Amino acid sequence: MNGLECKIRQGLLQDVRPMRLPAGIGGDAAGIVDEVGDGVTDVQAGDAVFGSGQETYAEHAVLTSWAPKPSTVSFEEAAGFATPFETALRVLDDAGVRGGHTVLVNGASGGVGSAALQFAVDRGATVIGIASPSNQDYLVSLGAVPTIYGPGLVDRVRALAPNGIDAAVDVAGSGVIAELVELTGNPARVVSIADFSATEHGARVSTGFGRDKTHALREGACLAAAGRLTLPVTQTFPLAQAGAAQAASATGHVRGRIIVTMP
Ligand SMILES: NC(=O)c1ccc[n+]([C@@H]2O[C@H](COP(=O)([O-])OP(=O)(O)OC[C@H]3O[C@@H](n4cnc5c(N)ncnc54)[C@H](OP(=O)(O)O)[C@@H]3O)[C@@H](O)[C@H]2O)c1
């Protein structure tokens, strides 16, 4: 379950992701392949995969991007991989994050944030993660230097990174683009996935609709298989309670991932 899906259900993304009712929902899944389409040669019936498609809150779904599920990762955890992997790698690339950089991730404890943090650490960056007080230890467990959101953010980050911030990624969309630009000193090094006012500050908004995710899924699966990346499942809901799962997601305070499980 992705933060994005509540917005789609509420009709807030009709311009970019139109939905005609009746319709299913859901973008990510993990499971066993039943059938493959014409020209698909890299998986076969019986293989365990994870990936992205449409209407995936379902017992059967068609994936349009996929990768083999690492054998060391549960189906529940792998079901939450696809969107965070693709989004996190895209936004890090857009912000030019590389080894030796000091990177700020706003909203580091959710699905995309947890992935972005760990991919950046794996690239050799120092990551400062922003989350609520209750998630500070969690951020440390993923390899970040933690700080809290709220008033005084710029001063707190400067105290943690006296040599400056090379790039900032806004996952939460919590209205801090001006602060991120101030901290990086360069709007071109600030990228948001959730704050469409970012462009007013000279920063960029990154969207991934329609992109092929295969490369990102394979890169993330390699890290997960090697034990260098995890997206912990903090809540599960059976399919019949998908509405309750969306309500939990809509609080905006998900740690790791919420997963909808099949009977
Ligand atoms: N453009 C794209 O390509 C794209 C792709 C995927 C998702 N998105 C968007 O990205 C956003 C995040 O998605 P997600 O699935 O990662 O969401 P999520 O798993 O629900 O995580 C939301 C996170 O935001 C944090 N948060 C809440 N208030 C905050 C604040 N004031 N400052 C900083 N962090 C705050 C929460 O941390 P605490 O619990 O610690 O407060 C939580 O960990 C959603 O708005 C989604 O629509 C965009």
Image (tube, rainbow, N blue to C red):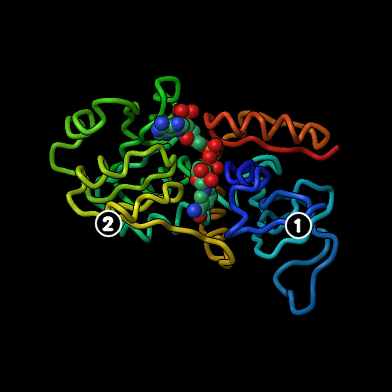
Q: Position of residue 46 (x, y in %)?
A: 82, 58
- Between residues 74 and 63, which one lies in front from this camera angle? 63
Q: Which residue is mark 2?
A: 202
Do we see residue 226 in this rendering? no
Residue 65 in picture, x, y percent from top left: 65, 64
Any atom of ligand 1 within 8 Å of the CB at mark 2? no
Please say whether residue 149 is visible from this viewpoint: yes
- Of all residues, the one furthest to the left in this rendering is 163
The residue depicted at 16 percent of the width and 43 percent of the height is 164
**Identity of the amino acid at label 2?**
Gly
> If the image is split into quadrants, where does the C terminus sit?
top right
- Quadrant for the N terminus in the image: top right
Q: What is the x, y in percent for residue 178? A: 26, 43
Which residue is disc 1 drawn over? 20
**Image label count:** 2
Tag 1: amino acid? Arg
Say whether disc 1 or disc 2 marks the residue closer to the N-terminus: 1
Q: Which mark is residue 177?
A: none
Residue at left offset 42%, top offset 47%: 195
36 relative to 171, above or below: below
Per the image, label 1 sits on a secondary structure element best described as: loop
Residue sitting at 56 percent across and 62 percent down? 209
Q: What residue is drawn where x is 67% and y is 35%?
A: 246
Q: Position of residue 180 (x, y in %)?
A: 27, 43
